Image: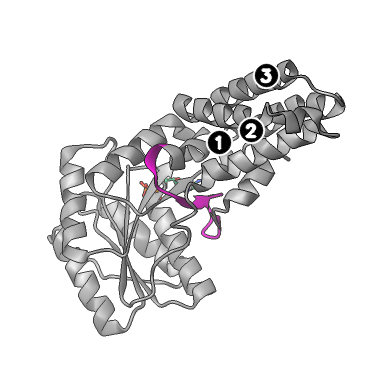
Amino acid sequence: MFESLSERLSGVFDKLTKQGALTEADVSTALREVRVALLDADVALPVARGFIDRVREKATGAAVVKSVTPGQMVVKIVHDELIATLAGDGQGQGLKVDSPPAPVLMVGLQGSGKTTTTAKLAKRLKERDGKRVLMASLDTRRPAAMEQLAVLGRQCGVDTLPIVPGQDAVAIAKRARQQAMLGGYDVVMLDTAGRMHVDDELMAEVAAVRDATQPHETLLVVDSLTGQDAVNVAQNFNERVGVSGVVLTRMDGDGRGGAALSMRAVTGRPIKFVGTGEKLDGLEEFHPERVAGRILG
Ligand code: GDP
């Protein structure tokens, strides 16, 4: 995760911290290199630009240039700005699943890792938070996807709603809620259908399920490897159905990290979890401070 960005930044900062005294020109050169590193990591242009502007404002003051360890001060400013970029207003981390049966709507494009993430989250809620979770697949067009969720449920010991052929997504969602209420479940996770692209039919279906279930969380699952596309998809889903948070999958294979760095700034929505592998325990809570620490080594 973030390997290439981390390497690039450590190159820039090694030079800077070894230098002792710094001129404003030294800081400017370093920030230009940081900007290029961010863009090469596929960070959205306005995000990279805003980031550098804010760092420059703080780093070109007399306090930095005159300080005993100016290089380290610049690194600290970049570190703090990374946290601010990743965390936004700091609101929205964690899941709101306190009033049972709390509906959690899982949305996203096909292949993003949505079904796997549904099972990962269910497993986590069960094991860490002691929640009783019911999962339901609403993917009426792909019986294989419904079966996949049932298989994953058996693997992690989480119940899935029995499949009844012929029901539409809203009918399944209502049945899931009913079953969750009757069965004393704490959380009901609704794995909506995905498509290859964002389209009107998909959005209409997700919106109908949302209206029928009033989810406490609507989590968008996106593939971090798709970089700026992931951010565009998030923006689109957020405008059209409203999401409460994002799960970025395949972070284990993402050496660049552009989606993670741009997501909050562009969409205004927090990354709540990241997928870190194919296995069902490959899910981590997203902590902006830790991620900033990882990026800066
Ligand atoms: P869906 O079509 O969005 O429901 O996608 P799936 O859940 O079926 O996932 C598609 C593929 O991505 C599967 O092979 C998953 O094992 C894999 N996958 C999902 N999340 C991750 C992740 O965080 N890391 C890795 N390496 N693979 C993942």
**Residue bearing the label numbered 1:** 257
Instruction: Examine the rendering and report whether any part of residue 42 can be seen.
Output: no
Quarter of the image where the C terminus is located: top right
Mark 3 or mark 2: which comes first in sequence? 3
Question: Residue 46: percent from the left, percent from the top?
Answer: 45, 26
Q: Which residues are magenta?
A: 266-283
Instruction: Examine the rendering and report whether any part of residue 279 can be seen.
Output: yes
In the depicted view, which residue is nearer to us: 175 or 60?
60
Mark 1 or mark 3: which comes first in sequence? 3
Helix, strand or loop at label 1? It is: loop
CA–CA distance between discs 2 and 1?
A: 24 Å
Q: Is residue 223 left or right of residue 296?
A: left
Amino acid type for the residue under numbered disc 2: Lys
Mark 2 or mark 1: which comes first in sequence? 2
Quarter of the image where the N terminus is located: top right
CA–CA distance between discs 1 and 3?
A: 24 Å
Question: Residue 275: percent from the left, percent from the top?
Answer: 51, 50
Q: Quadrant of residue 69?
A: top right
Helix, strand or loop at label 2? It is: helix
Amino acid type for the residue under numbered disc 3: Ser
Mark closer to the observer (1, 3): 3
In the rendered structure, find residue 69 and report the number of the disc placed on it. Answer: none
Question: Residue 7: percent from the left, percent from the top?
Answer: 71, 30
In the rendered structure, find residue 58 and report the number of the disc placed on it. Answer: 2
Please name the residue shown 87% across and 26% down the image. Answer: 20
